[in-house]
Image (cartoon, rainbow, N blue to C red):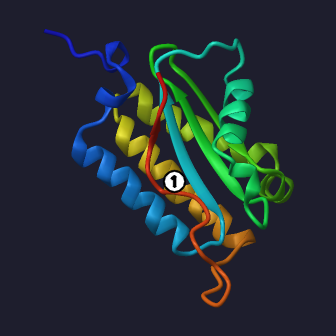
Amino acid sequence: MTFSLFNKHPEEVLTGAEKELIVEAIRQAESRTSGEIRVFLESHNKYVDPVDRAAEVFLKLKMDNTVDRNAVLLYVAVKDRQLAIFGDEGIYQRTGKEYWNNLVKKILGHFNQKHFATGISEYIHQIGEGLHLYFPFDRATDHNELPDDIVFGS
């Protein structure tokens, strides 16, 4: 019997423990930054370009409403095998395109080895480090602006 990650519904791709691993990675990363990180999984991307879909999801989740415009979305269309990272203007202007491209290559390496949850968690830690550099945590003013849970589309 062969196991195929890409034949499952988005909610079934991750075990309960893997979901908690990802949520905990988000919490840890955000504990060092005022930035916000979200993960969105769905089966199919109705757009040709996953970045376009990620931008739509980003706005739908109101991720553009953070004070410092420093939210980042990891978008995955599971059955289409598509991945996009979408950062708001505040973080994107400071990190540049190459930073994001390198992160995508790293996470795709994990996905290709079927280390899905590990890839997402490692990405979250890495983006958290980048956010920490440009948007460090300030105990006096920082609060969690967006939920840390994984969002599942259809």
Q: Residue 150: x, y in percent?
A: 44, 44
Residue under the point 32% across and 21% down: 5
Circle 1: element type: helix
Q: Which residue is mark 1?
A: 124
In this view, 125 is above or below 31: above
Give residue 101's position: percent from left, percent from top: 70, 39
In the rendered picture of this protein, how many numbered marks are placed on residues? 1
Residue at 62% of width from left, 65% of height from top? 145
Give the answer, above or below, for where 138 lies relative to 69: below
Callout 1: few (<14), some (14-19), or many (20+) C-alpha neighbours within 10 Å?
A: many
Q: Residue at x 83, y 60 (%)?
A: 94
Which residue is most to the top?
1
Q: Residue furthest left?
A: 1
- Left or right, 69 with reference to 128: right
Q: Could you say where residue 88 lies in the image, as x and y percent from the top left?
A: 77, 50
Tell which of 120 and 58 is nearer to you.
58
- Which of the image's four quarters has the N terminus? top left
Query: Viewed as shown, does residue 91 lie left or right of 50?
Result: right
Judge from the rendering whether residue 107 lies leftward or rightward of residue 141; answer left or right: left
The one nearer the camera, 56 or 4, is: 56
Vertically, is 67 above or below 58? below
Q: Amino acid at mark 1?
A: Ile
Residue 107 seen in render? yes
Question: Is residue 101 at all visible to an observer of this figure?
Answer: no
Q: Residue at x 55, y 57 (%)?
A: 126
Q: Nearer the viewer, residue 76 or 65?
A: 65
Residue 151 placement, left or right of 24: right
* Name of the residue lying farthest toward the bottom: 140
In the picture shown, does residue 130 fall above or below 15?
Answer: below
Point out residue 24 in the picture as x, y percentages from the top left corner. 37, 60
